[in-house]
Amino acid sequence: MKILQAYKFQLQPKAEQNQQMKQFAGCCRFVWNRGLATEKDNYEQGGKYLGYNNLAKQLTNWKREAKTAFLATAHSQILQQSLRHLDRAYKEFMSGKRGFPKFKKRGQQDSFTYPQGFKLDEPNSRIYLPKIGWVRYRKSRNIQGLPKNVTVSLSCDKWYVSIQTEQEVTEPIHSSLSSVGIDMGIANFATLSDGTQIASPNALTRHLKKLAKLQRQMARKVKDSGHWLKAKKKVSKLHCKIKNIRNDFLHKTSTMICKTHATIVLEELKIKNMSRSAAGTIENPGKNVRAKSGLNRSILDQGWGEFKRQLQYKATWNGGKVVFVPPQYTSQQCSQCGHTEKENRKIQAKFKCLTCGYETHADFNAALNILAAGLAVTAHGVGKAQAPIGKCEPACGIA
């Protein structure tokens, strides 16, 4: 089977190359925003969806306009790729997979993609980017497969290159036959049906006081002044540290689970609904808003969505599979006798069945129920399992 794998490395550009990358990212951002504005105006006037081909024709005219002649300085393919990304975002919105595409701001997700034209010199740890030249990168591991495209992105004032490769591999067979159910939580990041409890890194919670202090310092400065920019850089640096701690934990944990177990069963959690604000409206104000806000922050701090994504593609790599089951009543049902009642779990951490008297940790009991439901899905072919996956984007070259 064919798999797509991404290798991410930090670039080490010269001062002139750094400036060119910023200009290219700005051109791609402009093309995205203008394409999105064109689509919106066309829709409001009753027109049909334009799509990539029509926008690509307009891109040629934009380059000829005096006000937007700067677009000609960027490589044409990265501008076209920006429109392709917009086209895909629109199609995913129309199919209900994602929300409506948003306009991009400077400094947020600055990136550009080369579909071809780049060259890779792995022995010398450098890559050739059209119109930029040879750029060195910090090599952390060897690249396997045929490079298909590269994406250059800016994060925390550092440039990174993500090299996506394609390779043909034999259908993997997992070395283990074991199955495991996973109950996601906050006090414990995950509890496995084999009794393993994985503590949460709480990357944001641990740095919340420091982050609040830096944000207060930035708020006291005059916006866009030199001191304000320095304070903003400190806030951004701390955010990156939090993100890196979380990503490192998620990759190590997902790799460990996928290498150990052939079948992984998860609850199909609706994270967006779980982390929805309780503020309400002026006419109908919400209750316990502050407590719910803290809970929402803790839920989002765990990174459940990214963990689920990593488990899916890593399980495929190792010859395993991920199965999803409904989350209803997994914490109230007894894993031994099947009795379901809310009173079985009077406190958060303890489960005690009122029928058979079975007593254990509530998360462990839920993990056993999740595993049983997943095995029923695989045995009877009913329920929801993962779609075949051969694509992934591991962060910072970690798989």
Image: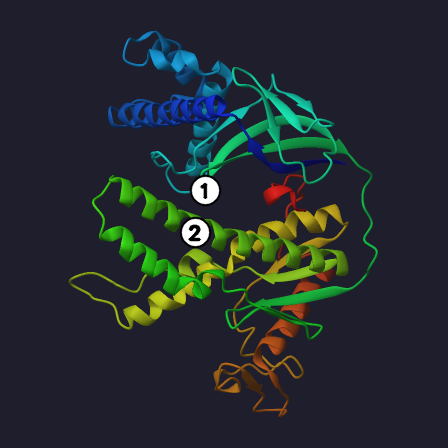
Position of 80 relative to 222 (above/below): above
- Type of the residue with mark 1: Cys
Q: With 316 as the anchor, is 186 left or right in this view?
A: left
Badge number at residue 97:
none
Residue depicted at x 45% and y 63%:
299
- Among the 4 quarters of the image, the one containing residue 255: bottom right
What element does badge 1 sit on?
A: loop
Crowding near the residue tagged with mark 1, few <14, some 14–19, many ≥20 C-alpha atoms within 10 Å: some
- Type of the residue with mark 2: His
The one nearer the camera, 193 or 340, is: 193
Q: Are marks 2 and 1 in contact (CB under 8 Å)?
A: yes
The one nearer the camera, 41 or 129, is: 129
Residue depicted at x 60% and y 16%:
117
Give coordinates of residue 137: x percent, y percent. 61, 32
Q: With 9 as the anchor, is 235 left or right in this view?
A: left
Give coordinates of residue 229: x percent, y percent. 31, 42
Badge number at residue 156:
1
The one nearer the camera, 314 or 250, is: 250
What element does badge 2 sit on?
A: helix
Q: CA distance from mark 2 to mark 1?
A: 9 Å
Counting residues from the start of the chain, the first of labels 2 and 1 encountered is 1
Q: With 63 as the anchor, is 180 left or right in this view?
A: right
Residue depicted at x 61% and y 61%:
266
* Total numbered circles: 2
Give coordinates of residue 228: x percent, y percent. 27, 45
Residue that badge 2 annotates: 239
Please say which color scheme the image uses.
Answer: rainbow
Position of 251 relative to 155 (above/below): below
Crowding near the residue tagged with mark 2, few <14, some 14–19, many ≥20 C-alpha atoms within 10 Å: some
Q: Indicate the quadrant containing the N terminus: top left, top right, bottom left or bottom right.
A: top right
